[in-house]
Image (spheres, rainbow, N blue to C red):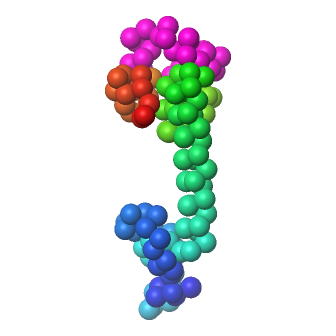
Amino acid sequence: MKKDEVPQDDANMLEGKFKVVKYALNEKGEFEKVPSVGWEPENVALSQAWDVINEKVEAARQQVLKGGASPLLFHMEKNMMDIALLAKYMGLPTGKVKRHLEPDGFAQLDTILLTQYAEVLLITVEELKRVPA
């Protein structure tokens, strides 16, 4: 592919930012990195992936609002983490993290663990304790 043929199908998936996704031939016949805002198949796939992620986050939020899970579940999903990954970042067994995903288990967390979860999730302890209405 030549440099001027690199797709620039902007679906605003990158909010107007470029990313280097292609190597293309320049005028000298040499490969070089070419910035692109994307191309249609990539944009469709990214859009579908974000739809799935947003559905999981919303399902977690609803579960928390109904009292079936702790706010930790919402924040874990929002950060695209699973139990194993969160447990690894926390240095805890997965069973403990599973317990903290339950309302009763979360309610028993001390300040140290709440602070550690908040730091891992890049939010404040107060944000950790709630979900958007």
- Is residue 100 rendered to the left or right of residue 10? right
Residue drawn at the location 65% of the way across and 16% of the way down: 95
Residue drawn at the location 52% of the way across and 27% of the way down: 65
Rendering coords of residue 109 (x, y %): 47, 10
Q: How many marks?
A: 0
- Please state which of residues 105 and 86 is positioned toward the viewer in this rendering: 105
Numbered range of the magenta stretch? 88-116
Say whether residue 96 is magenta. yes
- Please state which of residues 25 and 54 is positioned toward the viewer in this rendering: 54
- Is residue 50 rendered to the left or right of residue 133? right
Q: Quadrant of the N terminus?
A: bottom right
Q: Residue at the far right: name it.
A: 95
Q: Is residue 117 above or below residue 2?
A: above
- Please state which of residues 25 and 70 is positioned toward the viewer in this rendering: 70
Q: Residue at the far bottom: name it.
A: 27
Q: Main secondary structure of the magenta part?
A: helix
* Residue 11 can be seen, yes or no: yes
Q: Is residue 31 above or below residue 28?
A: above
Q: Quadrant of residue 33?
A: bottom left
Q: Quadrant of residue 99?
A: top right
Q: Quadrant of the C terminus?
A: top left
Residue drawn at the location 50% of the way across and 81% of the way down: 6
Say whether residue 123 is magenta. no
Rendering coords of residue 128 (x, y %): 41, 25
